[in-house]
Image: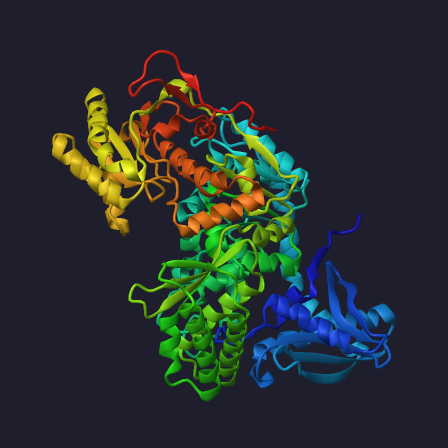
Amino acid sequence: MSSPKYTVGVRTLCEFTARRGDLDLRFTPSPSAQEGISGHAVVAARRGPGYRSEVPLAGEYRELVVRGRADGYDPATNLLEEVKTHRGDVDAVPERHRRVHLAQAQTYGWLLCREFGLAELRIAVIYFDIGSQVETSIVDTFAASELQHLFEERCASFLAHARGELAHAAERNAALAALRFPHAGFRAGQRDLAEGVYRAARADRCLVAQAPTGIGKTIGTLFPLLKAWQGATLDKIFFLTAKGSGRRLAFDAVERLQPRSGRLALRVVELVAREKACEHRDKACHGDSCPLARGFYDRLPAARAEALNLEKGALDQAALRTLALAHDVCPYYLGQELTRWADVVVADYNHWFDPSAMLFAMALAHEWKVALLIDEAHNLLDRARAMYSAELDRANLRRLRHGSPTPLARAIDRLGRRWSELHASQDKSAHVVLNIPSRFAAALQQAVAASTQHLADHPTRIDPPLLELHFELLRFARLFETFGDHSIFEVTRHADGRGSTLAIRNIVPAPHLRRRFVTARSAVLFSATLTPFAFHRDTLGLPADSAWLDVDSPFDPRQLSIRIARHLSTRQRDREVSLAPLADLMARQFEAAPGNYLAFFSSFEYLERAAACMAERHPDVPTWKQSRGMGTTDRDAFLARFGEDSRGIGFAVLGGTFGEGIDLPGRRLIGAFVATLGLPPPDRLNEHLRQRMQASFGDGYGYAYLFPGIQKVVQAVGRVIRNPTDRGVVHLVDDRFGRADVRRLFPRWWRVEPGPFGAASAEPTGDPAVPRE
């Protein structure tokens, strides 16, 4: 029986064995991924008719299988080429990068000699300048024996690590095969969720799973995906969250999955934003400035080895920081390195879905088979819209004009003139929606090119404000390149009439996200509020064969009394007259059942007026309010008022920090008042969104207003019932809550009682026609 083999890519092998010295993140104007692909195509097109591109190669060394694709080989001249794209002065390409580039070329060189029986080979590392289209070639001739020696030397250096990875994979797979659900049984509905996730993973499909709060969604999705690991031939699971609390739940689930005897041989690492992981925020990311960057790659092997051999392989942010500082390396970049060798990566949405997402880029580069778990997926639409939107302020352009070198100053002036044309052509409206003017787009591209060239020519004299503006212009320009019906272009005039802000606002991220979902082997989006399914499928760009699962609630409908105040309207025009009867309603409920309540409003203005009315008419009812810009201390103080023995009403804004993600079980919260449908304001921007949604999906009002609004309402109501012993009451304050199109969006287990305080029989709210799998 042959021993197991470990397959490694040429790039990974060379980066592992050839990187030395400092971590150096000083600015280099690197081409985008698409520009890199285009650059490779240009170089290949310049070659003769016998030139071979993307040559697949493979070779073995003991337990290692080394694979990759050489960029090009010309049999006529016996020349192998490794092409690297760059911008600016080729001499500015760092030596640490050149060392890896040459190692890759030499590795491909031996694999090619072995494949074709060559005694020697000419090898060229080609540096192709994206801007000037100029090639710089560094050519040398190697005997096949020398290339073989270098190949075997690198493989030998990597072999101990490869053997460790083979042993880890065997131990992990055995542990997953023996993995058992950590509780005596599944909660009601939890088994349906787990089975749906397992089937989706084995079938390489996307699943949208709506599952009620309290069902145990984190463990109910992670456990079956781990059980499906071997059958789905996965390399990694990416657990993606909208908030840090979601990442903590993921680590808690891994801890609960640990068997009573033995261990769950699972490597789990948490990724956070660089600003949260940085130890020296006053220093730049290179060895001349930061001590944790100095000699980073020299100390990395020891830090990596300790991390990969921990008895307990779960490294959250705190544990990763402790380990990194023990080895004097940067915690953030150690986390990136460990991502290569982790089984489960816990991170924010943006690490996969953002235009510059690291996890997505690594998955493409290394051809990983990835499964996604997307927690609280109802947040993804708004987050993705922000990822594919950008703003530019004219004031920043003016500040940078002074003191800029002549070529850059001319480009800024040209962009400023085109900007002024936009500004002057508009009326006095705050928002004006436009198509992209071609003259402005051309000026923007020229400004990006000028700032890129300036930064490339002066790599050691970079002005931080200029660098910041460069990245703003670059982001804006790249969004221009993909501009379409999924986005709008705005000019917003400043209140003083002297300046303006330009914005690309994404409204349908589906075209941007579609490839992210297709690249993943499978994906599970789960949340308590994902109705209607078609809304999320269409706006997020989910595959056409995505499955839908609406999990039954574990709660008894008798636990939650839903009452609709049909005699009140919270529409903008009716808010003033709604204040007194709303205050009286809340007071009557408080008197009937004293305890803790949350009251949700559409805006801070409405909240303040309702709180003032409540204090005036019912001063004996304790109240406290959410304020604008609440910090962590104030948020904690607000939640601390909801004690087991306290009483009162907390006033909050729907869709804010207290509308989801907080847990107030038992007597800490016994009811809620929702005095809004959560509909976005019908301003010019949202009306344009409605028109686009109508044209694309045939339901502009639902996609732009109703579905996002009721989603917030359901999330807020979900704060009341958190476990099987909770009891509570919710007042939905607005006559529109009684409409059939609104009530179809309520969870199926809700039952609405007639009248403001109800009695008699309950009315079912869910739509039985909602598809289920």
- Which residue sits at x=70%, y=72%? 40
Where residue 106 sits, quadrant-wise, is bottom right
Residue, far bottom: 406
**Looking at the picture, does residue 68 appear above or below residue 654?**
below
Where residue 399 sits, quadrant-wise, is bottom left
Q: In which quarter of the image is the C terminus?
A: top right
Q: Residue 548 location in percent, x, y?
A: 58, 34
Q: Residue 453 location in percent, x, y?
A: 53, 82
User: 772 or 245: nearer the eye?
Assistant: 772
Where residue 412 sits, quadrant-wise, is bottom left
**Looking at the picture, does residue 724 appear above or below residue 60?**
above
**Looking at the picture, does residue 165 appear above or below residue 20?**
above
User: 43 or 390: nearer the eye?
Assistant: 390
Left or right, 665 with reference to 309: left
User: 554 or 504: nearer the eye?
Assistant: 504
Q: Residue 681 location in percent, x, y?
A: 37, 45
Disc tally is 0
Q: Residue 285 location in percent, x, y?
A: 44, 72
- Which residue sits at x=74%, y=60%? 65
Q: Can residue 223 be seen by looking at this rendering?
A: no
- Which residue sits at x=59%, y=47%? 541
User: 421 or 770: nearer the eye?
Assistant: 421
Q: Can residue 249 be seen by looking at this rendering?
A: yes
